[in-house]
Image (cartoon, coloured by chain):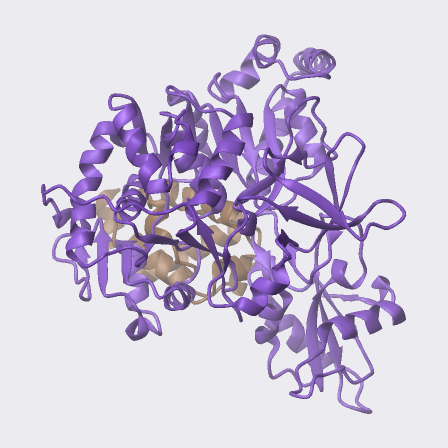
Chain colours: A purple, B brown
Amino acid sequence: MLDLRQYNSLGDALRAALERWPNETCLIEADRERENLRLTYRQFKETAQPLARTLQDGGLISENRAAILMTNQSKWLISAYAVFFCGGVLVPIDYKLTAAEQIKLLQHSKAEFLIVEYHLWLAITQAEGFGKLPTRTVLVTEAPNNAELSGAKRWEDFTDSREPVFVPRERRDPACIVYSSGTGGRPKGCVLTHENYLEQCMALTSLYPFWPGVRYLSILPTNHAIDFMVGFIGPFTCGATVVHLRTLRPEFIREAFTKYQITYMALVPMVLKNLEKGLRQRFAELPKGKRTVLNGLIGVNRALTRRRPNVKLSRVLLPQVHQAFGGQLRALFVGGAFTEPATLQFFYDLGIQVGNGYGCTEAGTAITLNDFKPFRADTVGKPLPGMEVKIVNPDSEGIGEVAIRSKTLMSHYLDDPEMTADTIVNGWLVPGDLGRIDSAGHLQLFGRKKNMIVTEEGKNIYPEDIETYFEGLSVKEFCVFAANYLWPARTMIGEQLVLVVHPEPAQPLTAQVVANIAERNRRLLNYKRISGYLVWDRDFPTTASMKIKRVELAEQIRQTVERSAIVPL
Amino acid sequence: MAKYEQMKTLQDTTNEVLDLAATHFKVPREQLTPDDDFFKRLGINSLQALDLLTRIEQHFHIELPDYELQGVSDFRTLAERIQSRL
């Protein structure tokens, strides 16, 4: 790989990679069984240059913000490189958000440039708030001929062959603004520097190396910090190949594993569990004799890999399982949320390593990662090289709040010094999780200290954002909490939201109000739904400006009622 | 088959989509209406929605690219996208 210590910016390092491996394949884009595109590093450079020229002609200069709003596809990476080449700051926007939410983040980021897929652009032009977009140049990809683009330009029209001018950046300059959450009340735009990414890339590739010939299958959204790192910066600075699959249908993912001989893939716990379910089902359908043999071989593999993984041996012992993953798979990376140990153990016993760890966008992706020396399903691994992890105010069992210090910590939250000061204290990031470092140096997690939940799909849900759906409820006041925040449960799984309602004085909660709560709840997406409500008969503590003092209220509830008081919906 | 598909109205297509969703996720057909958000009404996640799309593709003999359906969450819009491909 490139020696990233020699480079000052992502644009600088990527540009060097394109020169270093001109004839290696860097990018393949497939749609179901069809291959749309295959580029070498040289061809990638030739494709990106006209776009960079277009952006420069459009006025993109250092530190101008340029947003990308696309599903996983080749133009995402080409556009990102062009932005870095021009010295711009990239704003990756989540394509899974609603158009209104995307507009809100574009406004918050003050992005002047937007590169967007046609269908997503169409939805934005029809959404409320379209007129308030801050962008002055919009490039739309894959627009049909004669499509009305509402003032945008067509990506494919730019073929200017004049050489664009490379704009150098310093390591401490901002590279990206990544929204970790906050589509509700308060957008959290993490400002990450070039140094953050270069340092993170060196740390990750020291444990999970890439090299020419390695193929990474990209199905997690590239706007997500994990895919951006292991599905772009990591493989590109090592001469490896990224395979974009433009569908998430399991049957085509299975096919891609074999067709492209995939080495690595990142996924969220929900997809990993789905894979586990499918495999378990196939094992259960085997005739009894074959099933007994399989279980025996899994047992042998488990025994022989107890101290360290041995992928060659596992491929020999369990050839059909490994062939189903293409025969070249070295590891799956799971992230975005907590993964159950039983699932990790299931895959490890089959000889499939799952790179499981702990991280957050604010820390530039991963903080800890399992190193398989030996494999342990009960922890989230050891701190990556360059990461300092400590436990603040540990109790008698050593459990306290996790704090992190490293060169990968974001610079700040965009335009929010107050939230930045709450999150980075004296140079230490405090994401709000409870953990313990054991005698082997592994981090174990025991729940959250802050009022939030993370779903298996990797979505951060802030209870405050859910409250808007219950506004107008016929009660005196209400508040939403994460149940594990009210009653610390020392677990990272089974997280749920609870609605605390304070009825009007002398009026018990009527069946009608309960029905109204249930009806409003049904209108929420399933992962945002509250699992029950709790009746509270005292006034909520409030500030002078009548805002609920959540910490105080939570403490009162914790002291007064048990978790069993939640009435399930 | 192609001729038959061309004769379908948007309402036919919408009804067939609702029938398929009701059968696939075992919910009473009468509980589903065209304007329902299928994620919310069926209580499904993104993977389950893909499962439904595959079932719909098989039924209508068409291909519905995932990326073109980003942001589509109600039965009516889904039926319109299907109709435009029949």
Q: Can you see residue B70? A: yes
Residue closest to the eye, A485 or A417: A417
Place of residue A478 in the rendered image (x, y in percent of width and height, measured from the top left): 70, 78
**In the picture provided, is A386 more to the left or to the right than A104?**
right
Q: Can you see residue B8? A: no
Q: Which residue is drawn at 67% across and 27% down?
A: A346
Residue closest to the eye, A198 or B66: A198
Place of residue A7 in the rendered image (x, y in percent of width and height, measured from the top left): 37, 36
Residue A215 in the image: above or below residue A136 = above
**In the picture provided, is B16 more to the left or to the right than A337?**
left
The image quadrant of residue A246 is: top left
Residue A281 in the image: above or below residue B66 = above
Residue A240 in the image: above or below residue A232 = above
The image quadrant of residue A113 is: bottom left
Residue A303 in the image: above or below residue A24 = above
Residue closest to the eye, A357 or B32: A357
Place of residue A174 in the rendered image (x, y in percent of width and height, measured from the top left): 40, 53
Q: Which residue is drawn at 56% across and 26% down?
A: A207
Q: Could you tell me which quadrant the N terminus of chain B lies in?
A: top left
Residue closest to the eye, A242 or A395: A395
Place of residue A280 in the rendered image (x, y in percent of width and height, measured from the top left): 64, 28
